[in-house]
Image: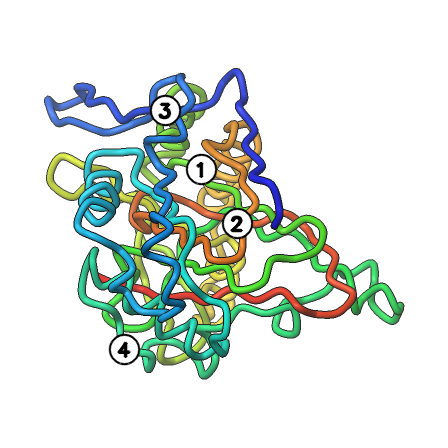
């Protein structure tokens, strides 16, 4: 079993605090303390693993309360450790993932994603451009930039779940960044670009998935984030609406903030780990990995 990788950066983030924003509204952001393991890591008791049933019944009331508290009160993500996946097919693991995320909200139907999009495997992942035409293209997979999931109608899901069925032999750590902290960095260093990020962008080129939405939005007292630079560029190209210089500058500033923002967490998901996060406030990414036998597999589910 792979060891947990947790990097604590000096400029990391921690528990959620409430601050007054301009105009008298409140906004959430992370403070500078790194979250404790107990804030997000929720091991299942051995009795919940022994049956190898692959059912959401393995998650008891106490674990459910801890997950819901983490999602609603901070740090807005949680990892359930020790789900029974031995003996299950990949599709059965996908069903388990959807079953467990139902504790947080109503699961999206599978039809909201492309076929087999609930299984994230090495075969589906693009190899690095530098490896094209090389045998190494079969074993090396590029890093995935931090982003939020867009899904199909009616829009970005509120919750995302990722269940690790088989981790990559090397690399493939999950990276989590708070959208609130990215917003705060922009407010501190590039405030002039924020109005542009509150205006609509085109996301995606597919008819069923394309939409317009702002990167940042204020819902009541909270700021939400929706970001995927690749899908934004595809969306504007498909819509015949090239990005304006102001839009490009704002997106570049967002990417710069991502690069300078220390990740909240970088962790190696173990087999049987299920990550749940608030997709409206958290960005997630993945480091590069090698997988000579193409064994890596995660399942994905969304809920509202």
Query: At which x and y percent is residue 180?
Result: 33, 33
What residue is shown at x 38% (from left), y 76% (from top)? Answer: 113
Q: Quadrant of residue 220?
A: top left
Give the residue pinned by disc 1: 177
Label 3 crowd (10 A; few <14 / some 14-19 / many >=20): many
Q: Between residues 189 and 17, which one lies in front from this camera angle?
A: 17
Give the residue pinned by disc 4: 109
Query: At which x and y percent is residue 294?
Result: 70, 70
Dot placed on the residue nearer the N-terminal end, 1 or 2: 1
Marks 3,2: beta carbons within 8 A: no
- The label number, if any, that marks residue 24 in the structure image: none
Dot placed on the residue nearer the N-terminal end, 3 or 4: 3
Q: Quadrant of residue 48?
A: bottom left
Give the residue pinned by disc 2: 269
Q: Secondary structure at mark 4?
A: loop
Label 2 crowd (10 A; few <14 / some 14-19 / many >=20): many
Dot placed on the residue nearer the N-terminal end, 2 or 4: 4
Marks 1,2: beta carbons within 8 A: no
What residue is shown at x 31% (from left), y 64% (from top)? Answer: 302
Label 1 crowd (10 A; few <14 / some 14-19 / many >=20): many
Marks 1,4: beta carbons within 8 A: no
Image position of 144 (left or right of 84) = right
Give the residue pinned by disc 3: 14
Dot placed on the residue nearer the N-terminal end, 3 or 1: 3
Distance between the alpha carbons at the discs numbered 3 and 1:
11 Å
Query: At which x and y percent is residue 235?
Result: 45, 66
Image position of 167 (left or right of 161) = right
């Amino acid at each position: 079993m792979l060891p947990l990788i947790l990097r604590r950066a000096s400029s990391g983030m921690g528990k959620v605090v409430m601050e007054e924003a301009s105009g008298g509204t409140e906004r959430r952001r992370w403070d500078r303390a790194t979250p404790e393991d107990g804030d997000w890591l929720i091991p299942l008791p051995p009795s919940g693993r022994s049956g190898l049933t692959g059912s959401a019944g393995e998650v008891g009331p106490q674990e459910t309360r801890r997950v819901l508290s983490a999602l609603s009160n901070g740090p807005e993500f949680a990892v359930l450790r020790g789900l029974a996946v031995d003996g299950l097919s990949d599709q059965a693991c996908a069903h388990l993932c959807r079953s467990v995320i139902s504790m947080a909200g109503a699961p999206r139907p599978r039809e909201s994603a492309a076929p087999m999009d609930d299984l994230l495997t090495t075969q589906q992942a693009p190899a690095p451009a530098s490896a094209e035409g090389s045998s190494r293209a079969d074993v090396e997979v590029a890093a995935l930039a931090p982003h939020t999931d867009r899904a199909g109608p009616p829009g970005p899901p509120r919750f995302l779940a990722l269940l690790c069925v088989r981790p990559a032999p090397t690399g493939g750590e999950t990276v989590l960044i708070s959208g609130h902290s990215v917003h705060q960095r922009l407010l501190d260093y590039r405030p002039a670009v924020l109005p542009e990020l509150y205006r609509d962008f085109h996301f995606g080129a597919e008819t069923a998935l394309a939409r317009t939405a702002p990167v940042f939005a204020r819902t009541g007292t909270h700021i939400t984030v929706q970001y995927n630079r690749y899908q934004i560029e595809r969306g504007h190209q498909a819509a015949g609406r090239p990005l304006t210089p102001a839009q490009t500058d704002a997106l570049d500033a967002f990417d710069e903030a991502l690069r300078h923002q220390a990740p909240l967490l970088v962790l190696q998901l173990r087999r049987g780990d299920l990550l749940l996060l608030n997709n409206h406030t958290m960005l997630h990414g993945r480091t590069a990995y090698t997988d000579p036998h193409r064994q890596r597999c995660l399942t994905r589910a969304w809920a509202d």
